[in-house]
Image (tube, rainbow, N blue to C red):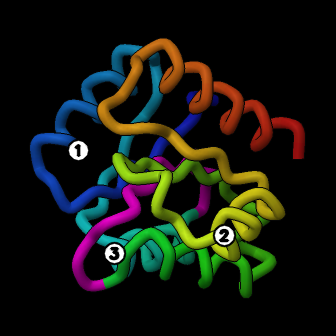
Amino acid sequence: MTAAILVVDDDDDIRSVLRELMEEEGYQVEEARNGDEALRALKRASRRFGVLLDLRMPVLDGIGVINAVAKDKALRRQHAYLLATADNRTLPLSFVQQLTSLEIPIVAKPFDEPKLYSLVASAVARLRDN
């Protein structure tokens, strides 16, 4: 079965580029424009997703999504998450600790493609191992 990636970003261009990059790597890709759309998609999903989640978005940001995931055991078990941000040095320590405890790596923007591919592959591998 081909792994699926959910790209969550409010920027249409970034979503489009990430879709293209992930599809070139052989992943099936779905998109969400904000955290609220992402949570709805993840809760109704019949398959497991590697979720590439932007930090800064309107409606519900990446922190809100991670907080919801932390409270929902089914969302934690069914999907694997990566947090994408250009400003990882300004994250609150408590949030960084939460990311660590949930085993959610940070993907730096702008994207270093080999690093991005490696982190996504690791997330997908975690899905297969659980």
Q: Which of the marked residues, 1 or 2, is nearer the chain's N terminus?
A: 1
Residues packed near mark 2 inside 10 Å, few (<14), some (14 to 19) or many (20 plus)? few
* Amino acid, disc 3: Glu
Locate the N terminus by quadrant.
Answer: top right
| 49 within the magenta span | yes
Query: Is residue 108 positioned above or below 35 on the image?
Result: above
Disc 1 designates what residue?
15
Q: Nearer the viewer, residue 52 or 79?
A: 52
60 to 4, vertically: above or below? below
Q: Of circles 1 and 3, which is in front?
A: 1
53 or 99: nearer the viewer? 99
- Pointer 2 residue: 93
Q: Amino acid at mark 2?
A: Leu
Q: Quadrant of residue 59?
A: bottom left
Task: Please provide percent x and percent y for residue 2.
Answer: 57, 28
The image's mark for residue 37 is 3
In-front residue for pair 92/9: 92
Q: Is residue 70 left or right of residue 111?
A: right
Task: Give the number of the mark in front: 1 or 2.
Answer: 2
Measuring from the top left, give residue 127's x and y in whole percent.
76, 43
Q: Could you tell me which secondary element the residue under label 1 belongs to?
A: helix
Mark with earlier residue (2, 3): 3
Q: Secondary structure at mark 3?
A: helix
Q: CA distance from mark 1 to mark 3?
A: 14 Å
Q: Name which residue lies at 49% across and 81% down.
A: 64
Closer-to-camera residue (60/109): 109
Quick one: label 3, few (<14), some, or many (20+) residues within 10 Å?
Answer: some
User: Amino acid under label 1?
Assistant: Arg
Mark 1: few, some, or many residues within 10 Å (few <14, many ≥20)? Answer: many
Q: Which residues are magenta?
A: 46-59
Residue 15 in percent (x, y) is at 23, 44
Q: Residue at x 31, y 66 (%)?
A: 56
